């Protein structure tokens, strides 16, 4: 069994609405990733895609539609629905069996053609008990935010500061959908969506075709002199029923601890150089930082106040702008891995951080108030 798997090339498209055909978008992004790796379609042994049937993709049997354009025709492959970082792990495990030397991971989401995110997430609910009360992801997040603020004394201003930071970081990212220089007051004075959430604290609905080329250790060293290794991975899923959960004590701690153990990390605040976190709602970046071990429980507000998570801070978080700046709902976890890869290779362009990045964390989440979490540790 092969022990190490590397990412050798990545590609992505911009998050703003595009009139380009979904099929053509997938082809161009996949072709770009293969070209960067110096590979042809025939050299890809297996394909794992992350896409959504019906709700976000609007297409039943979604992979039947884009399979040809994403280099997967007549190849052993699989499709993953839900948190897209799962697809990265599935592809890596296929290589680790020793049966495949290379794998292509593709995340697909054309937000401009999808219903509103909360129209989709409303359909995640139990049809007998939850759907009738209008529960969706933003309602769940608002309940979680209120509980977070009241239990730990986190201020509105500290939550809004996440949006100020991330949308400012996005100014340097050509792929970002939403960006700009904003004040805390501007964030708090934006339209009240569901109390206490305001519009600028909620991620947009974006495009997002993502491609990553993975290879075994021997193959990776032949393809590139800068492989980025998958050093640790884990995921964890909470119970489905919303009322059975403590919304401030979810499964991210479990996913992170297992990923850290696999990667040999004992002090994440010191050993992780950069984190790309999926924060569909601004306050969640603070909460997820706590669960990832970057600060004590309830300390997320103080962490952002300290400046540590700024692009030039000791532990940059979402130097790309994060999900608040670009939210291809289905493929956003994979996009965090792409951004981590670029930072490790020193290829993130204008949003490259000033410090040397040897170890980066990519995080993805799916479901109400972080029902499911996945963590990947990448390193040089």
Image: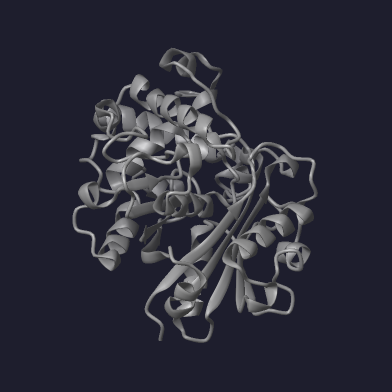
Q: Residue at x 57, y 41 (%)?
A: 327
Which image quarter is the C terminus in?
bottom left
Image quarter in which the N terminus is found: bottom left
Q: Position of residue 365 (x, y in %)?
A: 46, 50
Residue 251 visible in the shown view:
no
Q: Quadrant of residue 116?
A: top right
Lateral position of residue 73 relative to residue 131, left or right = right
Q: Is residue 306 visible?
A: yes
Residue 350 in percent (x, y) is at 48, 37
Where's residue 305, x and y in %?
Answer: 27, 26
In the image, residue 263 sits, relative to residue 173, either above or below, namely below
Q: As rendered, which of 139 and 264 lies closer to the eye? A: 264
Q: Is residue 70 above or below residue 150?
A: below
Instruction: Please give the name of the residue rendered at 47% of the width and 23% of the height, measured from the top-left corner.
Output: 195
Q: Is residue 175 left or right of residue 259?
A: right
Q: How many marks?
A: 0
Is residue 311 shown above or below 256?
Answer: above
Write the residue at 50% across / 65% down. 8
- Residue 310, percent from left and from top: 34, 32
């Amino acid at each position: 069994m092969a022990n190490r798997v590397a990412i050798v090339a990545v590609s992505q498209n911009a998050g703003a609405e595009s009139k380009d055909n979904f099929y053509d978008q997938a082809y161009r992004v996949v072709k770009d990733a293969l070209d960067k790796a110096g590979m042809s379609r025939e050299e890809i042994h297996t394909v794992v895609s992350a896409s959504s049937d019906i709700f976000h993709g609007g297409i039943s049997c979604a992979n039947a539609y884009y399979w040809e354009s994403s280099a997967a025709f007549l190849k052993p492959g699989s499709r993953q629905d839900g948190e897209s970082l799962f697809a990265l792990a599935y592809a890596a495990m296929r290589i680790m069996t020793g049966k495949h030397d290379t794998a292509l991971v593709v995340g697909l989401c054309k937000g401009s053609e999808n219903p509103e995110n909360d129209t989709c997430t409303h359909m995640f609910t139990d049809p007998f008990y939850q759907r009738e009360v209008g529960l969706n992801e933003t309602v769940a997040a608002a309940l979680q935010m209120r509980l977070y603020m009241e239990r730990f004394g986190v201020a509105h201003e500290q939550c809004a500061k996440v949006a100020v930071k991330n949308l400012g970081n996005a100014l340097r990212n050509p792929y970002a959908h939403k960006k700009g220089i904003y004040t805390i007051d501007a964030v708090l004075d934006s339209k009240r969506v569901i109390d206490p959430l305001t519009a600028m604290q909620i991620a947009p609905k974006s495009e997002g075709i993502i491609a990553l080329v993975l290879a075994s250790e021997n193959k990776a060293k032949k393809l590139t002199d800068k492989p980025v290794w998958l050093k640790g991975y884990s995921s964890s899923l909470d119970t489905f029923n919303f009322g059975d959960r403590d919304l401030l004590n979810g499964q991210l701690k479990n996913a992170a601890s297992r990923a850290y153990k696999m990667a040999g990390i004992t002090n994440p605040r010191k050993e992780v150089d950069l984190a790309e976190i999926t924060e569909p709602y601004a306050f969640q970046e603070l909460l997820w930082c706590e669960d990832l071990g970057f600060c004590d429980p309830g300390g997320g507000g103080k962490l952002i106040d300290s400046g540590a998570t700024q692009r030039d801070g000791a532990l940059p978080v979402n130097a790309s702008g994060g999900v608040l700046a670009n939210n291809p709902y289905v493929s956003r976890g994979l996009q965090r891995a792409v951004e981590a890869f670029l930072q490790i290779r020193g290829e993130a362009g204008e949003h490259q951080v000033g410090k040397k990045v040897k170890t980066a964390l990519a995080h993805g989440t799916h479901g109400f108030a972080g029902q499911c979490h996945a963590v990947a540790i990448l390193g040089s």
